[in-house]
Amino acid sequence: MNSDQFVPISVIAGFAKVRQLTTDAALVLEVLRSSKEVSVNESGELVRPNVRPQRSTLILRDIPSDIPLAVSP
């Protein structure tokens, strides 16, 4: 995986379960291009997942010390 999270399509095509289905590299590329789960780069050589990490933490910085910790209704 490179710094942009792309992996060569040859790695995907080399997976044992993919090889059991097909050894046709053009078919693997076609399927990857039609998938909503991954993106294929413009040259058709690299693929990456279309997942975005979900953040559940909010980090607050530089809060003035005179702000109350809890607000009452």
Image: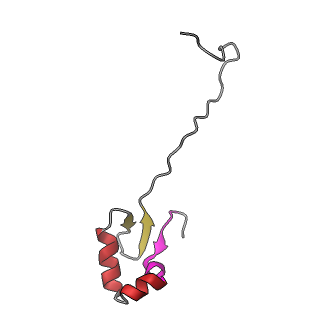
Residue 50 visible? The answer is yes
Q: 25 or 4: which is nearer to us?
A: 25
Q: Which x, y percent locates residue 27? A: 30, 82
**Residue farthest toward the right in the current orientation of the protein:** 65
3 displayed left or right of 69:
left
Q: Which x, y percent locates residue 54? A: 50, 47
Residue 58: quarter of image: top right
Q: Which x, y percent locates residue 25? A: 36, 85
**Does the magenta portion include 13?**
yes
Residue 60: quarter of image: top right
Q: Which quadrant would the N terminus be assigned to in this image?
A: bottom right
Q: 70 or 2: which is nearer to us?
A: 70
Reply above or below: 34 against 69. below
**Residue farthest toward the top in the current orientation of the protein:** 73
Q: What count of labels does the image hold?
A: 0
Q: Which x, y percent locates residue 22? A: 36, 87
42 displayed left or right of 8:
left
Q: 2 or 36: which is nearer to us?
A: 36
**Residue range corresponding to the magenta coloring:** 4-15
Please tell me which residue is depicted at 64% across the width and 29% down the height of the picture: 61
**Does the magenta portion include 38?**
no
Reply above or below: 9 against 63. below
Please tell me which residue is depicted at 54% across the width and 40% down the height of the picture: 56
Q: 32 or 73: which is nearer to us?
A: 73
Residue 29: quarter of image: bottom left
33 displayed left or right of 17:
left
Q: State how the image is colored.
A: secondary structure
57 displayed left or right of 44:
right
Please tell me which residue is depicted at 44% across the width and 66% down the height of the picture: 48
